[in-house]
Image: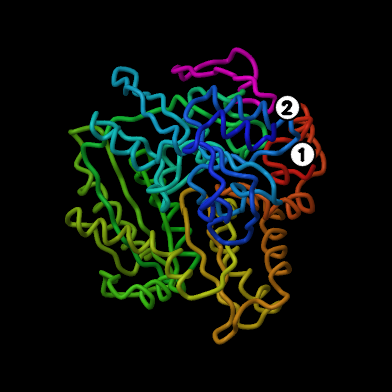
Amino acid sequence: MRLEDELAALLGPIGWQTDDMAGYQCDWLKMQAHDPLGVARPKTTQQVAQVVTLANRYGVSITPQGGNTSLCAAAVPETGGQIILSLSRMNTIGDIAGDVDCVTVDAGVVLASLHDAAADQGLIFPIHLGAEGTAQIGGLIATNAGGSHALRYGMMQDLVLGLEVVLPDGQIWNGLRSVLKDNAGYQLRKLFCGAEGTLGIVTRASLRLFPMPKSRATALLVVDDMDALVNAGQFLRRDLGEFISALEFLTEAGLDLALHHLPDLKFPLESRGAAYVLIEVETTSGHVDLPDLLEKALGVAFEEGLLVDGAIAANDAQRATFWRLREEMPEGQRLEGPQIKHDISVPVACIGSFITRMAPRLDAILPGVRINPFGHLGDGNIHYNLSPPIGAAGFGDRKGELSQTIYRAVEEIGGSLAAEHGLGRSKVNHADTLRCPVERMVMRQLKHALDPAVIMNPGVIVHG
């Protein structure tokens, strides 16, 4: 019997798909597209384990896939003839334990669905990102996603209490626990956070939830240069501290693109500037006047010359308007045409100087290249995206040199070439070149210790 026949018998016509695979085989940025052997869509952890066991028997590799919103081509095969294993049918949300503020969910649960389920119980799951309507919990764990509220709540690995994982040999590790402190040896749950499906397939997770805020205040602010951007962020972090749930930034270049390509998008302030800060503060206490607290902090910032304009959202509609400016940064650039995305992080104090000094270096490589930096002012994560010069169809043969120059500059100042999207397939060579050889060796050793047959997502994170 062929592998395809065994998978069809195991999973049935809904669970084993060999036609209409376009939505599975190509990544979101259309960097890779290969014809898989088929798409396995198991319904249970036991079925996942059986698929992995069969793949081992036939020597066929597997690419686990969540919502397929990866920006580094990690969720699609590197060659044809592999199995795509979609977790989309494993989408059960367990009972939410309000007394301990946690929940156990299947890996295929869509982030927005978890938000809704938590809200029904007066709780929140604090990961927020643009793809939350399609991104799945398993993929968020596999990439160790961050998002706009990581400054307060941490990355995905900080929200995972326990995991259930199918290992590369088909064994099931049940590490589902609902306690914050578990020091009984190596922190295995964190090993799989950010592993991008190379060490096993996350099938279920126990996740931390938090009380829903009782009060929130949001402000959009204007600064006149990159130094002021960093200084304003530092002031706000020190003055508002634990109340800050999000501290984001965008620049004039990205705002221009978004306003040009999205006619219904409106800029709500009188003044424009070099950059913009979006700050949101929250509290679960009913005894704190957050709007007053934020207003007083901004008053001092204006007095010290850190800000040139700004406003506090008067209602939820205005808050949504402020947030949409930040959230439409990727869409505005996408509609402009070809782009190169870079998900990097630098020390927070270096954000302004990095943005300022990189522009002439990149212009020397490709005159007229347009830079759109935006992202997370609170933690140094910059989405440093490029568009070709006006009138150019693309980047010519300069694409690799542009990216390598950016990544090298990031690593030289103690940053990271992969902040929250992972390495995937697209950044492996850059990591091999720029990261410590010992670090890369340890990653390869971990990979081969757990997956000696290289069944799980080959070509992602490490070669071979």
Which numbered disc covers residue 134?
none
Q: Which residue is mark 2?
A: 450
- Residue 313 image point, x, y percent: 22, 57
The quarter of the image holding the N terminus is top right
Furthest-bottom residue in view?
391
Pair 2/1: label in front: 2
Question: How far is the residue under mark 2 from the one under mark 1?
Answer: 17 Å
Name the amino acid, label 1.
Glu
Predominant secondary structure, magenta span: loop
- Residue 394 image point, x, y percent: 62, 78
Q: Is residue 451 visible?
A: yes
Q: Is residue 380 visible?
A: no
Name the amino acid, label 2.
Leu
**Is residue 182 in the magenta section?**
yes
State which region is magenta.
166-187
Q: Which residue is mark 1?
A: 439
Looking at the image, residue 296 lies above or below residue 138: below
The residue at 35%/43% (across/down) is: 112
Q: Are marks 2 and 1 in contact (CB under 8 Å)?
A: no
Secondary element type, mark 2: helix
Looking at the image, residue 382 lies above or below residue 141: below
The residue at 64%/38% (across/down) is: 4
Secondary element type, mark 1: helix
